[in-house]
Amino acid sequence: MEQLSIVEKDGANYHLYELEGALNAYTIGEFQNTLYEAVHKNNIVLDMSKLVELDPAGIGFLMAAFNDSEDVGNKLYFMSMSNEAEKAISATGFKYLFNLINSVTEVN
C-alpha cells in the first residue's frame, strides 16, 4: 500500500503542502484535520505533482476542504496535478470550479 508524505512550506500569502504518494481512505487520517484547520486560517496550495493515487475518499476530502475555504473567504489551490490527480478531479465533473494553478506565483 502506498503512503502519503507531506512537506509544509510558508509563502507570502499562502501555506503550501507538497503531497507525495497516495491520497486515499487509508492515508487521509491526520492530514484531514490539519487541512480543515489550515483553510480557516490562510490560503492553501496543494502541490499534487507527486500524487500517484487519488481515490473517491480523497476527492471527497478535497471537495469538503475546498468548500470550507470558500465559506471563510480563503482559497484552496490545486497546483501541478499529476496525471492520476488530473483524471480523478476531471471525473468529478466539477474541475471547472476548483482553483487550478501551475505555480505559486498565481496565488492571489
Image (cartoon, rainbow, N blue to C red):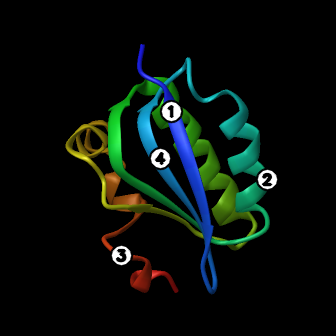
* Percent position of residue 16, x then y: 56, 65
Q: Earlier in the sequence, mark 4 or mark 3?
A: 4
Q: Which residue is mark 4?
A: 19
How far, Cα to Cα, is label 2 from label 4? 17 Å
Q: Is residue 102 above or below residue 36?
A: below
Q: Quarter-wise, where is residue 68 in the image?
A: bottom right
Q: Earlier in the sequence, mark 2 or mark 3?
A: 2
Q: Earlier in the sequence, mark 4 or mark 1?
A: 1
Q: Could you say which disc has been placed on residue 103 in the image?
A: 3
Looking at numbered disc 4 in the image, what kind of residue is underneath it? Answer: Leu
Looking at numbered disc 1 in the image, what kind of residue is underneath it? Answer: Leu
Point 78% across, 62% down: residue? 40
Q: Earlier in the sequence, mark 1 or mark 3?
A: 1
How far, Cα to Cα, is label 1 from label 3? 22 Å
Q: Is disc 1 in contact with disc 3, using a CB cutoff of under 8 Å?
A: no
State which mark lies toward you, 2 or 1: 1
Q: Is disc 2 in contact with disc 4, using a CB cutoff of under 8 Å?
A: no
**Callout 1: helix, strand or loop?**
strand
Q: Nearer the viewer, residue 96 or 57?
A: 57
How far, Cα to Cα, is label 4 from label 3? 15 Å
**Callout 4: helix, strand or loop?**
strand
**Callout 2: helix, strand or loop?**
helix
Q: Is disc 4 in contact with disc 1, using a CB cutoff of under 8 Å?
A: yes
12 left or right of 40 in image: left
91 left or right of 45 in image: left
Looking at numbered disc 3 in the image, what kind of residue is underneath it? Answer: Ser
Q: Quarter-wise, where is residue 25 in the image?
A: top right
Q: Which residue is mark 1?
A: 4
Q: Which residue is mark 2?
A: 37
State which mark lies toward you, 2 or 3: 3
How far, Cα to Cα, is label 2 from label 3? 23 Å
